[in-house]
Amino acid sequence: MNKKIIVTVGLGLLLVGTLVGCKNNNKTTYETIMDKKEMTYTMSAVYPPFNFINDDGDVAGFDIDIANAIAEKMGVKAVPITTEWEGIVASLIANRSDMIIGSMAITPERKKKVNFTAPYYHGGAQFFAKKGTTLKSIKDLKNGKVGVVTGTTFIQALDKMDNISKVLQFQSDIDNFKSVVQGRSDGLVTDYFVGLEAPKKYGVDIEAVGKLLYVEDNAIAIRKEDTKLLEVVNKALKDIIADGTYEKISMKWFGINIQNINK
C-alpha cells in the first residue's frame, strides 16, 4: 500500500513537472531571446491612420494597436520609438529598437538589409489629386509634379513615368497633402488607406484618382541576426489573426478587415 502511494505521488510530481515544463516551453520566448520585458519598435508617426501623434501627444493608429497585440501575446510591453522614415532601417540595424512596425513594404533592396515577417496587410500605391480634378489617371499629367514621402517605394515608381517631370519629397504625408491643396504639386502618391483618411483627419480636399498603381506587402522588419525573434513575432502575428484580435483592430481603424483587401 505504501509502495503504491509512493509511486502515485512520484508520478504526480512527474506530471506536474511535465506540465510546468510544457508551460515554459509553450510560453513565448521573447524574454529569453532578448533578455528584457519590453519590445521596442519604431515607426515614423506621420502616417495616419497607421501611425501618428494624437491630440494627447501620444502615438496612435493601426500599427500601434497591432504592436500592442503582438506584445501581449509575447507577454511583454510594447514601447514605441519615433524616427524619420528615411533613416528607419539604419536605426534598426544600429540596435535602436527591436523591430520596425510602421507599415513597411517588403522590397528586394530592404530584404538585403533586414528580415521580414509574414505580411500583416496588403496596401497599395494610390495617386491623389485636389478634389474636383479633371484627371482620370496619373497618366493624364503632362510634365507633372507629384509629391511623395522621402524613403518610400513610391519614388522609384514615379521615376519610371515619362510624364512626371519632378518628384517632390517630403518628410511626412501631412506636408505632402498640404502641397497639393496649396497648388505646389499636381498630386501625390501614398498608400490608398492613408490618402482616404486625409480629408477627415486633416481637412484637406483631395481624392483618389484612377486605380492602384501597384500592390505592396507590408510586414514587420527585424534584424538579420535575430532569427529566433523573427519566429516568435511571426507566431504572435499568426495568433492575433487566428483569434480575431487583428480583425477587431482593423475594423476599429478602417471599418473593414484590410489583411488581404488588395491581395
Image (cartoon, rainbow, N blue to C red):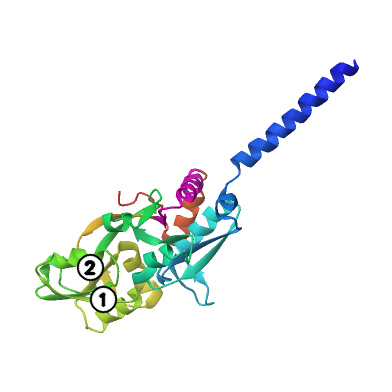
> Which quadrant holds residue 52?
bottom left
> What's the amino acid at mark 2?
Ile
Horizontal placement of 193 versus 6: left or right? left
Compared with residue 107, is residue 184 higher up or lower down, i.e. above or below? below
Q: Looking at the image, tell me whether mark 1 or mark 2 is earlier in sequence order.
A: 2
Callout 1: 10 Å neighbours few (<14), some, many (20+)?
A: some
The numbered disc on residue 53 is none
Q: Are marks 1 and 2 in contact (CB under 8 Å)?
A: yes
| Residue for badge 1 | 169
Residue 46: percent from the left, percent from the top? 40, 72
Predominant secondary structure, magenta span: helix
- The stretch of residues the image draws in magenta is 220-242
Answer yes or no: is residue 103 visible.
Answer: yes
Indicate whether residue 17 is drawn in magenta: no
Indicate whether residue 238 is drawn in magenta: yes
Secondary structure type for disc 1? strand
| Residue for badge 2 | 155
Closer to the camera in the image, 31 or 239? 31
Closer to the camera in the image, 214 or 44? 44
Horizontal placement of 122 versus 245: left or right? left
Q: Residue at x 49, y 74 (%)?
A: 54
Callout 2: 10 Å neighbours few (<14), some, many (20+)?
A: some
Answer yes or no: is residue 209 visible.
Answer: no
> Hey, which residue is sitting farthest right in the picture?
2
Q: Residue at x 59, y 40 (%)?
A: 26
Residue 75: percent from the left, percent from the top? 61, 52
> What's the amino acid at mark 1?
Gln
Give the alpha-carbon distance from disc 1 to disc 2, as whole Å: 8 Å
Residue 248: percent from the left, percent from the top? 49, 53
Residue 24: percent from the left, percent from the top? 64, 41
